[in-house]
Amino acid sequence: MAFFGLFNYSKPGPGIDKNAPKKKRFFFFFELYFRKFWKLIELNLLFLVCCIPIVTIGPAICGMTYVLRNYSIEKPTFLLSDYWDAFKSNWKQGFVLWLLSTAVTVMAGTSFFWYFVNSARSWMMLIPFGFCILLCLILFFMQFYIYLMAVTVELKLKYIIKNALIFAFLGAKTNIITAFFVLLIAVPTIWFFPITIPIIALLAFSTIGFITVFNSYPYIIKYIVEPHEQQLREEQGDDEEEEEDEDDVIFTDIGSQERPAASSNNDKKGGKGKIMR
């Protein structure tokens, strides 16, 4: 999508040397960010438009997360069509996740405020107040993974929440770094509202989302996607044939298609067969 022909994304680039050394993720992030800068503006505008009917906020987050995930792994992406496909295919789960997230956030925020106000009356209130701070932090970290798993792996809602809780602790160091940069953008944007309206309209949501996806997706790759694909290779008996290519391929994304895992092992574990998207 281009604005009146101003931005032409069909022009071929110089390409990437296959044997080029991998860049450090900190520098690679900024390279990707500025390479996708205009696309992020378009995505931010598309996201806001899709959020105008309040009930579509959850699916809109799923659509944006799916596109940002593809950007973070440098997968060729058609912004409008890929966004819309993810929006439709994750409609139900995205809506429920948004309702749950909103309800839990309101309850945690209300408890936080109530214990903070009453802590002046009794020092005993500082104990539940501290638990509220910890709970809010864990819920904040879980948000980094919930929608990302929803658009990547076909799992029941309870397993998405359970995995997000595990990742909140497992990726604690990365989550703290992510939270720092997210708050570095979000707090001034909210504090100086309405001066920051242009930033909110053009870049705030897509930038925050890109930071979150870029930092969080490697954990999903390492602990969900790679073990699942390894299991598939073992069950299909072609583990030895693909061993030589193992270093080149991290994750094969099949878009809107679905590939069910063998159900026998998953059923024994009591979980739903995972499907990669």
Image: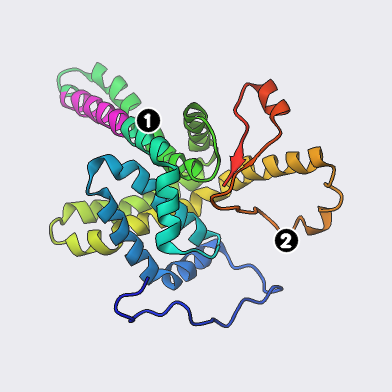
Within 10 Å of disc 1 (Cα), the crowding (few <14, some 14-19, many 20+) is: few
Residue at the image position 43 percent from the left and 42 percent from the top: 90
Residue at the image position 67 percent from the left and 45 percent from the top: 226
Nearer to us: label 2 or label 1: 2
Within 10 Å of disc 2 (Cα), the crowding (few <14, some 14-19, many 20+) is: few
Residue at the image position 41 percent from the left and 46 percent from the top: 88
Q: Give the extent of the magenta segment.
A: 102-117
Residue 151 x %, y %: 49, 45
- The residues bearing labels 2 and 1 have C-alpha atoms spaced at a distance of 40 Å
Quadrant in the picture for the N terminus: bottom left
For the residue labelled by badge 1, is the local secondary structure a helix, a strand or a loop? helix
Above or below — where is 66 with respect to 172?
below
Which of the 4 image quadrants contains residue 108? top left
Above or below — where is 113 with respect to 153?
above
Viewed as shown, does residue 218 lie left or right of 114? right
Can residue 148 be seen here?
A: yes
Above or below — where is 13 with respect to 108?
below
Q: Main secondary structure of the magenta part?
A: helix
Tag 1 or tag 2, which sits nearer the N-term? 1
Callout 1, which amino acid? Leu
> Which label belongs to residue 248?
2
Callout 2, which amino acid? Asp
For the residue labelled by badge 2, is the local secondary structure a helix, a strand or a loop? loop
Q: Does the residue at mark 2 contact the one at mark 1 (Cβ under 8 Å)? A: no
User: Quick check: is 110 in the magenta stretch?
Assistant: yes
Residue under pointer 1: 134
In the rendered image, the residue lying farthest to the left is 194
Which of the 4 image quadrants contains residue 95? top left
Viewed as shown, does residue 166 lie left or right of 176? right
